[in-house]
Image: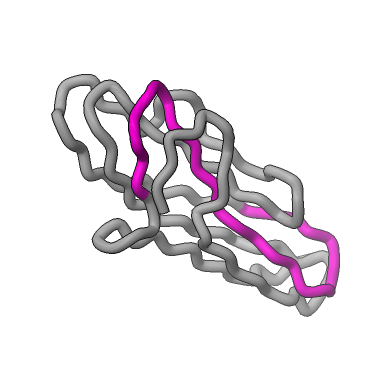
Amino acid sequence: MSTTSSSLVDTGLTASITPSSSSNKILIIVDAQGQFPANTGFGNAIIRGSTAIFQTNNYSNYDSTATQTNTRASYCYLDSPSTTSSTAYKLQVHAYNPGTIIQNDGNNKTTMTLMEIEAWL
């Protein structure tokens, strides 16, 4: 997908998991691949349902010198959904400064892995 939006938009990457216990946690691992022109960058957010549970800080993936940049950013987040119902996660992206961000498309595949972590009481 590609975007010039400074607001978060869906990348098309979604995943779901059903925790076996409401006290268990979900480890979310994202390997985000992105392509963008000079003086542009991107940020990502992990969304559970309709709530942003993780968002990168400003300009975490930014390049002011290259004419075209291909980059990757990896994120890990430990979530506590407190449920045994199926829980959906999705990845969103937004652009910093004018420019087209390409993510999760063609040679810019992005992955999201979900792992249930058993709670030790």
**What x and y, as percent, mark residue 71?**
26, 44
Against 107, residue 40 (above or below) is above
**What x and y, as percent, mark residue 103?**
38, 51
Front-lying residue, 70 or 22: 70
Q: Quadrant of residue 16?
A: bottom right
Quadrant for the N terminus in the image: bottom left
**What x and y, as percent, mark residue 39?**
27, 21
Front-lying residue, 45 or 74: 45
Against 43, residue 107 (above or below) is below
Residue at screen point 40% across, 30% down: 60
Front-lying residue, 76 or 37: 37
The image shows a total of numbered marks equal to: 0
As for residue 85 lying within the magenta part, the answer is yes
Color theme of the render: one colour
As for residue 31 lying within the magenta part, the answer is no
Residue at screen point 57% across, 68% down: 114
Q: Is residue 64 left or right of residue 98?
A: left
What is the magenta range?
Answer: 78-102
Q: Is residue 21 left or right of residue 104?
A: right
Residue at screen point 16% across, 21% down: 65
Q: Is residue 106 left or right of residue 89?
A: left
Front-lying residue, 13 or 4: 4
Q: Quadrant of residue 49?
A: bottom right
Q: Quadrant of residue 79?
A: bottom right
Residue at screen point 34% across, 37% down: 100
Quadrant for the C terminus in the image: bottom right
